[in-house]
Each structure stands twice: as structure tokens, then as C-alpha cells.
Image: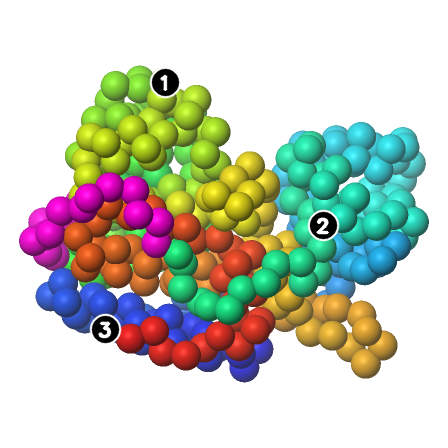
Amino acid sequence: MNRVREAARVLAAEIETLSGSFGRPLKVDPAEVMDRSDSIALRPPGRCSPNRSCRLFRAGDGWIAVSLPRPTDLELIPAWIGCAVEGDAWSAVGAAARARPWRDLADGARLLGLAVAGVGETRADSLQAPLLRMAQGRAGRRGSLLKVLDLSSLWAGPLCGAILAGAGLSVTKLESRSRPDTGRNMPALFERLNGAKAQARLDFADRARLAEAIAGADVVIASARPRAFEQLGVPPEAMFARNPGLVWVAVTGYGWTSAPDRIGFGDDCAAAGGLVRWTQRGVPRFLGDALADPLTGLAAAAGALKALEKGGGYLVDAAMARTAAGVAAGALAEAR
């Protein structure tokens, strides 16, 4: 965990430096943003994640992390492992995994929308979220005049929005009327992440109003996959065409361009990045609670501030597995 704490400290220091150029240097407490023990029952990490929604299994040629946080995930297990499940689903997964290559297991899960990763499959040499140039940009914007539209849910994206609000930007959390943020199921964490934001709801089927809201923002924070925005008629390319100074923060499991449709959650993405502890017998163990989530929230906020400082026109590609891999690799050099 020392490497995790140091990575959070480095990102917090970068945020403080960058936010200072917008008029309000923000001191982020790494320990506070990494902790949700007041919102969810947690157990010590081991072969199971602290929240018990993700587990590590031996595959035929390595190890996999399997996240099953949604009730519908359990219904897909028979289609994934190719046989009926009698009794405990986790036991069935463990028995099936031992005879198959980890890559086949991960690829099959991806097609079904299940979050499964090979332990250590992702490599990275940086903590920074890449900035992808999308438009020309527009300089000269500062502080509370900057409008942030937070469309994200759960932990990483909302944490990014909370940090931007703390830095003095005007942040509005916009939720779908039909699919509000499931983070509301953790009231204490939800309040910490969203309490400083204006709150609004919209029927996302009203494409004109959604496009207007996005195009009118300086920063958009999103945690949905690219095809969701295509279906809503608001792909980033179209929004950058309307607003060349936009900063679009894309929080995904594995990257906006590298694996745009792959599902990922904080625990399996941490394992994918190699952010685990290995026993003397070569068995992986989780290090903490969904570590890729808060670490990526910090990296996303730093990336957003950096993109704004450059005048916007960037997509911040904040991938949880890549962030975790950067931490695991010890890529902790100060960015500025």
C-alpha cells in the first residue's frame, strides 16, 4: 500500500499546483478520498475484494479478477462458462476457470458485458491521464466562470467533479431521470462527492437539451462508454465541433480509444493493472478497496485542470486499469 499512498500524494500535489493557476489552490487529503468505509461494509482484502463483489481465480495460465456487482451479472455466468450453475456461482466460476486460458475467459466475458480481467494484463509507465487533442481550444478562462457538467456516476468521475468544485469551478451534477447515479446507495460517500455541486435531472431522451447542456459546458465529466453517447446523439466529436474549447473527461475501465466498450470496475481494473500483493506461493491478493476508482478520480482531475490550462480542446482519457498499472509500476515522478 505504500506505493498507492505515494501515488495519491503525487496526484494530490499536482492538483494543488494546477488549481492554484485558477485562483484557488486546493489541498486534497489522499487518505480521505481513498476511503469509503463509512458508506459500505468492508472486510480485509484477500482473494476477495473488501466489498466482496470481486474475486481472484486461477486460470489455466495465470490469474483473473472477476467482478459481479450487479444482480444481472449472475444471470450471465452460465453463458460465460458454458454450463449450467448448480449451487454457488463463485464456485462454478472457479472450477471452470482452472481449465481455460485467462485471455479466453476475459474475451468471452467482454462479449457478455461482464467485468473480468487478467491480473497484470495492463502496462503503463505514467500516472497521467493522456490528453487527446480534439479541437483548437480557447484560452483566457479562469475560476468560477468555468462551468463543469458532471454526467458521471459511482466514484472516480464524481470524485473528479468534487475536486474541480473544490478548486472553485462551477459544477453541476446532471443525472438521467430514468437512471440516476447508483452511488446514491452509499449516502455518506455520495454527499462527499456531490454535496458541493448544483443538482439537476434531465430525460436524456431529450437529445436537443442534452446536447445544449454539454455544448455549453467548459468541462464534461462522463463515465459511460462511447457507444452510449453515439446512441444519445452527443458523441464527443460533435460536441467539440460546437465548442472547440471543451474539455471532455472520459472515465472508463480500459481507455476511450484502446478498449472503449470493455466493462471495468475499481477492483478488477486494479488487478488488471497489477495493483495486487503476491504471496510467497505466487498467489495474488487485493491491496485495498476498489483502488483504481479514487486513484483515477485524482488523475482525471489533474488531467482536466491541465487541459483547461492549455485552453481546452482535449479529451482526458482517464482509464482505471491504466492508472492502476502506472501506480503498480512505480511511475511516481512529479509531473510538474
**Disc nearer the start of the sequence (3/2):** 3
Would you say residue 143 sits in the magenta stretch? yes
Q: Which residue is mark 2?
A: 66
Provide residue 325's location: percent of width, then percent of height.
Answer: 56, 65
Q: Nearer the viewer, mark 3 or mark 1?
A: 3
Q: Secondary structure at mark 2?
A: strand
Q: Nearer the viewer, mark 3 or mark 2?
A: 3
Label 2 packing within 10 angstroms: few (<14), some (14-19), many (20+): many
State which quadrant residue 221 falls in: top left
The residue lying toward the viewer, choosing from 145 and 225, is: 225
Give the answer, above or below, for where 306 lies relative to 73: below
Provide residue 176's location: percent of width, then percent of height.
Answer: 37, 29
**Disc nearer the start of the sequence (2/1):** 2
Residue at x-position 31% and y-position 52%: 161
Amino acid carrying label 2: it is Val
Is residue 252 shown to the viewer in this render? yes
Determine the CA span between mark 3 and mark 1: 39 Å
Amino acid carrying label 3: it is Thr
Of the 4 image quadrants, the one containing the C terminus is bottom left
**Disc nearer the start of the sequence (3/1):** 3
Provide residue 299's location: percent of width, then percent of height.
Answer: 39, 62
